[in-house]
Image: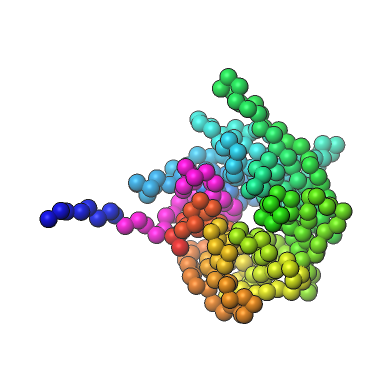
């Protein structure tokens, strides 16, 4: 009788302890870097840190090197704070490629609140700022010449006054080819949609009835008609349909404290994950909209702290990542 070796069961949760409290994180988009994450610190200093960590699937151990947040192109990362910085992740060390600043006539800068790297055209990055503007940057990357790569450079493609007050988040939509449309949210309590081909006007998708600031937004990865947003100190996530402006099609309200993060599934139009100060990460099935969605289909509790961020891996749809206190966890869903 033939004997078959039963492969060891993979863990459902992997945990990494960082040297400092964690606030931001993102997955690598490279298919050959399946379990690579960038983790951003949350310390009250001008210089925060970002670490790139990789999980060894054989040993279930994380390895880390300090740098800064990631996306595509050769192996480029981006961070925002005072300015937008682009880095190249290389061995033996990560190096700064460029600092993008569109206000060179002043010694002061308006802090950036968020950025989004366009998934269809990785030469485009959009930033949001407390100065009421959104800026779309164009990147140029040099070709390899004699095994030495030219620097990455960037220029302002457009800057626009997006809101009446501070802008807190920006995200590109996959609608219309995925290159030209984006939305933003801000302290004026509105969600606004823009088209790079027609910047003379914008569309107000939603306005909070009490004009409460909106802090985050996320587009559905499979159906660009839908996006999610969350207001400051709110326990609920609002789902919007751009075809029906100003009227939420669903409210996800099982959190018992402020929501901090929202992430749509990369492979499904009807699944979204939310995370908040109640230590919970919740996965919802919204396919029954516009009927009320009462409860999430999955829930995970981080017993040791409030969940500051959540990300659903584009190349890893079976895994989500969360961070709380000094810990980052990746969870099988």
Of the 4 image quadrants, the one containing the N terminus is bottom left
- Which residue: 52% across, 54% down? 313
Q: Nearer the viewer, residue 104 or 172?
A: 172
Spot occupied by residue 267 in the image (x, y as percentages of width and height): 53, 59
Apparent side of residue 284 relative to residue 97 in the rendered image (left or right):
left
Numbered circles on residues, count: 0
Q: Residue furthest top?
A: 146
Quarter assignment of residue 266: bottom right
Confirm whether the magenta stretch covers residue 82. no
Q: Nearer the viewer, residue 107 or 276?
A: 276
In the image, residue 290 sits, relative to residue 144, either above or below, namely below
Q: Residue furthest left?
A: 1
Q: How is the image coloured?
A: rainbow
Spot occupied by residue 81 in the image (x, y as percentages of width and height): 69, 46
- Which residue: 79% across, 42% down? 157
Q: Residue furthest right?
A: 200
Residue 237 seen in this snapshot: yes
Residue 49 seen in this snapshot: no
In the image, residue 290 sits, relative to residue 72, either above or below, namely below
Of the 4 image quadrants, the one containing the C terminus is bottom left
Q: Nearer the viewer, residue 233 or 27?
A: 27
Spot occupied by residue 195 in the image (x, y as percentages of width and height): 78, 54
Quarter assignment of residue 96: top right
- Which residue: 57% across, 37% down? 75
Spot occupied by residue 165 in the image (x, y as percentages of width and height): 82, 59
Apparent side of residue 142 relative to residue 155 in the rendered image (left or right):
left
Confirm whether the magenta stretch covers residue 22. yes
In the image, residue 193 sits, relative to residue 248, either above or below, namely above
- Which residue: 58% across, 35% down? 74
Apparent side of residue 294 relative to residue 216 in the rendered image (left or right):
left
- Stretch of the chain drawn in magenta: 9-36
């Amino acid at each position: 009788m033939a004997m078959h070796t039963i492969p060891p069961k993979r863990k459902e949760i992997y945990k990494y302890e960082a040297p400092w409290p964690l606030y931001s994180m993102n997955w690598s988009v490279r298919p050959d870097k399946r379990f690579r994450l960038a983790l951003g610190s949350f310390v009250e200093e001008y210089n925060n840190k970002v670490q790139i960590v990789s999980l060894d699937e054989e040993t279930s151990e994380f390895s880390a090197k300090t740098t800064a947040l990631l996306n595509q192109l050769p192996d480029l990362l981006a961070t925002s704070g005072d300015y937008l910085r682009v880095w190249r992740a290389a061995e033996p060390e990560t190096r700064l490629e460029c600092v993008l600043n569109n206000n060179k006539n002043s010694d002061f800068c308006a802090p950036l609140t968020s950025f989004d790297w366009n998934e269809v055209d990785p030469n485009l990055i959009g930033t949001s700022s407390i100065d009421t503007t959104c800026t779309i940057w164009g990147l140029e990357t040099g070709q390899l010449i004699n095994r030495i790569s030219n620097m990455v450079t960037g220029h302002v493609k457009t800057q626009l006054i997006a809101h009446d007050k501070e802008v807190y988040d920006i995200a590109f939509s996959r609608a219309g080819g995925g290159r030209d449309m984006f939305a933003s949210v801000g302290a004026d309590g509105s969600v606004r949609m823009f088209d790079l081909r027609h910047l003379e006007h914008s569309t107000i998708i939603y306005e909070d009835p009490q004009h409460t600031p909106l802090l985050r937004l996320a587009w559905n990865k499979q159906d660009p008609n839908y996006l999610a947003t969350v207001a400051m100190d709110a326990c609920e996530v609002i789902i919007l349909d751009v075809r029906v402006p100003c009227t939420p099609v669903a409210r996800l309200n099982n959190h018992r404290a402020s929501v901090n993060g929202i992430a749509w599934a990369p492979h499904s139009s009807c699944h979204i994950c939310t995370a908040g100060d109640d230590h919970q990460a919740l996965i919802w099935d919204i396919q029954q909209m516009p009927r009320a969605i009462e409860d999430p289909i999955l829930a995970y509790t981080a017993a040791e702290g409030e969940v500051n961020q959540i990300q659903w891996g584009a190349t890893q749809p079976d895994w989500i990542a969360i961070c709380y206190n000094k810990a980052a966890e990746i969870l099988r869903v």
